[in-house]
Amino acid sequence: MLEALDRLTEDQVRGSRGVRFVVGQCERLQGVSGYERDEVFALFRAARRLDPADAEALQWRERLLRRAEARLEFLPGLETLRGRVRVQLAGLLADSGRSEEALSLIVEALLVLDGERFAMATRDWRATWLSVEIEPAYDLAIRLAVVQSETSLARDLIVRSRAAGVVSPGTELPHRRPTLGDVPLVPPPRFRFLDGEVSSLGEGAPCLFC
């Protein structure tokens, strides 16, 4: 069943018949003991492959993502997948004018996904993760913050999106290649701005941002 679903979702799924068949395959995994993790991966992949221009597919994309998000609440060790699910769901909500819920989802997701790059030992890995997963999510989050008139949050997101991190020589990670310029990083701190405000995003004690 999983192999068939993988084949079906290699390309974008179009048409009512195709959509319903893919959804039906996902539903066959619901409640099957031992396949909980397979189910959430299937739900996420199917939601991403349904044609966004199809109204019926659009409704199913939201349902599949919400189902995946609900399942992930009880599955430890899949925080990164949950972040990716939330980014996809936030995009759907934003497109349908539900910017308040979308903003809440994507900010939580960003903190998880952006944190992943600090566990990556090489600059190349971090750069790929940034371009594929992080930068599009930051763009959407900033736009949503502006729409919601959350100017302080928009500022914090802009600043954090430009911060590569803090060099941490004492943090040793596997596969690090110092000769190629790979350095261990830790997340940026909360920034204290010149006007006295402190960023709502970041790690540890505030650091003066000039």
Image (tube, rainbow, N blue to C red):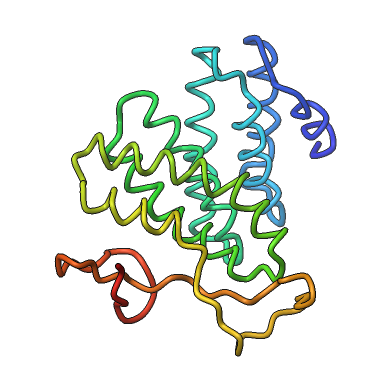
Residue 41 lies, in percent from the top left, at 67, 46
Residue at left offset 62%, top offset 10%: 16
Residue 161, x across and y down, in percent? 44, 54
Residue 28 lies, with reference to residue 204, above or below; the image says above
Reply above or below: 141 against 118.
Answer: above
User: Looking at the figure, which quarter contains the C terminus?
Assistant: bottom left
Q: Left or right: where does residue 126 sit relative to residue 191?
A: right
Closest to the observer: 30 or 209? 209
- Location of residue 132 by image quarter: top right
Residue at image location 39% in from the left, 25% down from the top? 95
Residue occupying image coordinates x 49% and y 61%: 112
Relative to 198, residue 113 above or below: above
Identify which residue is drawn at 58% across, 64% down: 116
> How many numbered marks are there?
0
- The x and y percentages for residue 162 are 45, 56
> Which one is in front, 80 or 37?
80
The N terminus lies in which quarter of the figure?
Answer: top right
Residue most extreme to the left? 195
Dividing the picture into quadrants, the one containing residue 79 is bottom right
Task: List the single residue furthest toward the front.
Answer: 210
